Amino acid sequence: MDPKEQDKSTEKNTPNLSPKDERRQAERRKRLLVTRIGADRRRSGPSPQKPTTPPKNLITQAVVAVVIFVALVSLYSFFSGFGDKKEVVGLSDLSQNISQGLVKSIVIKGDNLTVEYKDGSTKLSKKEEGTALSTTLTNYKVPEAALSKVNMSVENNQGLGFWILSLAPILLPILFVIFFLWFMSRQVKGAGMQAFSFGQSKARLIHPDDKGSRITFKDVAGAKEAKEELGEIVDFLRNPKKFLDIGARIPKGILLMGAPGTGKTMLARAVAGEAGVSFFSISGSEFVEMFVGVGASRVRDLFDMAKRASPAIIFVDEIDAVGRVRGTGMGGGNDEREQTLNQILVEMDGFEPTEKVIVMAATNRPDVLDPALLRPGRFDRRVTLDLPDRKDRLEILTIHSRKKPFAEDVNLAVIAERTPGFSGADLYSLMNEGAILAARENRLKVAQYDLIRSIEKVMIGPERKSHILNKKEKEITAYHEGGHALVSSVLPYADPVHKISIIARGRAGGYVFKLPLEENKLQTKKEFLDDIAVTLAGYVVEKSIFGDVSTGPSNDLQVATAIARDMVAKYGMSDKLGPVAFESQPGRPLFGANIEQRGFSEEIGAQIDAEVYKIIDDGMKRAAKVIKDHRSTLDAIAKRLIEVETIEQKDFEDILIAHKITPKRKKDLEHQK
């Protein structure tokens, strides 16, 4: 397949941004490290979901019970008829046999006769009801001499065994019917009890004595400011009298905000672990059901449970699932989600000052929350969790490496330096992938090489060894990636290159791994312009060298255009339009898509488009000039890539030095400053 690039971005954090912009920039900062070409041209659709098996209903259970009943009856009939079948003889024949002296003995059980003959055989017979056997035989003219030679005995039909055998054919069906009715009523009762418990809370409880699930601040690396903010909450839960005596009231609600994977849930658990209180955890989506009133009922039940277990912490993860702004016109003004939100607001207002129950919530979308949820008295304390810096990343890696055997060459400081923009969850995944790679190769220790490979696997994806390029595609990819690396090494404000590869990973057919000389929170206009030129270098190389353009640079164009438009419409970096923000706001959804609400005229929109095109065109010209001035260097990089497929930083710098290009060092950054 033709190579195609994955989504990436080059935007960094800027001051006074909205939460939505901060999330977008955090993702772009991480993906800025990699400039990639290619993925498969085709995108597979969503995988079909496996149909779920419906639960057993009462009809199915009734059929099963009937089948069991039929099987039991069949077994009873089989065993009751099993055994030696005895011949039945009539009274007239029995009389003749006695007269002939063939009968040895007769056993009388009620009206049933068991006749034993002298030849050892046994036959069954039956006498007349209400008449003695001797009288019956006399009537049949049996001689008294022959009758006296027959040993007759009588057995009384008494005892428990007799009655069990006699009543079994009647009692067994009756008992089975009684069992069947009890079983069915039990199922109906269970379904009814489930219906009554439908409104109960599904919160998961972590008891303070559960040492296996309990974590503390020592288990959460980084987030120093967040820990300091939450330290007051821990102190209040441990000793509330100190605050109440002086007239202070601890905040009722704490909202944890941050990008996905920054450790919001873990930090909430650590607060409960530090304070030694019960921790009730539930997701915002678990409140909402298709039945009206269920969400509000679960909210009431959750708060009642927490009050009974106080001091306690209620943690609602992804609260934006129920806490979105009301009155948006979607679902009406009385839908189930809004009723659930109203109940949360009421419960939080209902707390008394002496109640030791604190509500914590987490979200990565604080911009969509209802204002009533954020007012003082509810979630009036907001704690922001940023992506970890290099020192915090080293601490997080150290925590995740506690139970992993490392080789002697492992240096976690190097891994921390090569993972800017990684969240805590990304770092956990990195360490886990490194251990998996070592186990896959049947090694007992994790080496540094495993961790280096796991960085690329987490950022881009696993190697696709089956994705084999033909000779022409390999050459195009090598020149494409070489162009990215060359322009990034020449332009003064671009990040230095650490690795170049044309081995397919994930959806990328090749990539350039770049790292900044120093982590920063701001990005200047010059850095944006250099990033755009680096991003467009692959497109320029393909067009200038091969005289044609493949599908590989398609994502490069999207990323470069997005950066240029943000520079003009969001950051005020356009010389013509000046420091004015023209960013469009997303409107209400219509037929599954958001209709943007533009805060500027069509004329201004045309000027924005013209400025974006100018920035893109200037970036292409700068990239083309670098490629033209250093064509021999590009040829050397591409040739080396075709031979070895991957070039590490040292080998790449050797190529640059051989062609009189000075690699970027930290002193260059100090000189720029």
Image: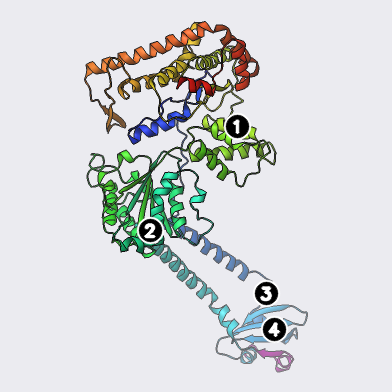
- Dot 2 or dot 4, earlier in sequence: 4
Q: Nearer the viewer, mark 4 or mark 1?
A: 1
Q: Secondary structure at mark 3?
A: strand
Give yes or no for residue 150 being in the magenta stretch.
yes
Which residue bears the numbered disc 1? 452
Which residue bears the numbered disc 3? 87
**Amino acid tagged 1:** Ile
Query: In the rendered image, which quarter is residue 453 located in?
Result: top right
Q: Secondary structure at mark 2?
A: helix
Residue 136 in view of the camera:
yes
Q: Secondary structure at mark 4?
A: helix
Magenta-tinted stretch? 139-154
Residue 202 in view of the camera:
no
| Image point (49%, 35%), residue name | 422
For residue 551, side relative to residue 138 (left or right): left
For residue 554, side relative to residue 116 (left or right): left
Are the two marked residues, 3 and 1, in contact with CB atoms closer than 8 angstroms? no
Quadrant of the image for the N terminus? top right
